[in-house]
Amino acid sequence: MSKDNIIAFLVEDKPGVLFNISNMFRRRGFNINSISVGNAEDTGISRMTITIDAEGRSLNQVVEQLDKMVDVIEVKRLDKLRTVIRELMLVKLRTIDPMAREEALGYINSNHGLILDIEPESIIAEVTGEPEKLDNFLEQVKSIGIVEMSRTGITALEKGQLKLKRSELNG
């Protein structure tokens, strides 16, 4: 697993919230390694998942700062051992050479990837999994030739009954 710490939180779904949160990280001197944002199960609420490289007191301070922000409803550090973590990557591989095409198809299949587009000179694949799995896939296909790629950043949910939810005080 990655050394990044995962912070998940619910926020009000309105303009400027993402800016305010990313600006708080900037002011504190933290680089956001990955961020994913999307609608939560309740209307008007979004769920954010951010990974940062921070430890101990610094990490606790970030979580406390987030918790104090007006638009943040609930914030929680996720324990990687009790969390399902996934990331999605689209990657375009150079496959002009027939042998490179065969090799690419083998790597994509062995990583349970999906082939989304095949052209005479390239293949676009979708690979999902833990960030380390995607890193390993990229290492495998590097010799074939990566034309371009796009990664979503991680998204995560705690296992079992654990849940990030609106607290009673917040509505």
Image (cartoon, helix red, strand yellow):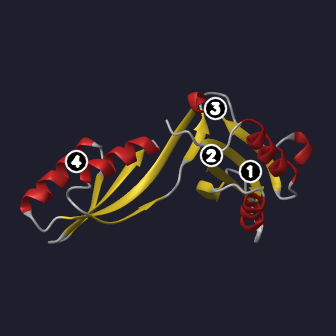
Q: Is residue 67 left or right of residue 19?
A: right
Residue at 15%, 52% (x, y): give it: 103
Q: Along the polypeptide, which appears first: circle 2 or circle 4? A: 2
Q: Nearer the viewer, mark 3 or mark 2?
A: 2
The residue pinned by badge 1 equals 10
Give the Cα separation between the discs numbered 1 and 4: 37 Å
Give the Cα separation between the discs numbered 3 and 1: 17 Å
Q: Which amino acid, by three-letter code, is at mark 3?
A: Asp
The residue pinned by badge 3 equals 79
Return the residue nearer the eye: 91 or 170. Answer: 91
The residue pinned by badge 4 equals 107
Give the Cα separation between the discs numbered 2 and 4: 30 Å
The residue pinned by badge 2 equals 53
Q: Along the polypeptide, which appears first: circle 3 or circle 1? A: 1
Label 2: how many Cα within 10 Å (few below 14, some 14–19, many 20+)? some
Q: Along the polypeptide, which appears first: circle 1 or circle 4? A: 1
Q: Along the polypeptide, which appears first: circle 3 or circle 2? A: 2
Q: Along the polypeptide, which appears first: circle 1 or circle 2? A: 1
Q: Which amino acid, by three-letter code, is at mark 2?
A: Asp
Give the Cα separation between the discs numbered 1 and 2: 21 Å
Q: Which amino acid, by three-letter code, is at mark 4?
A: Tyr
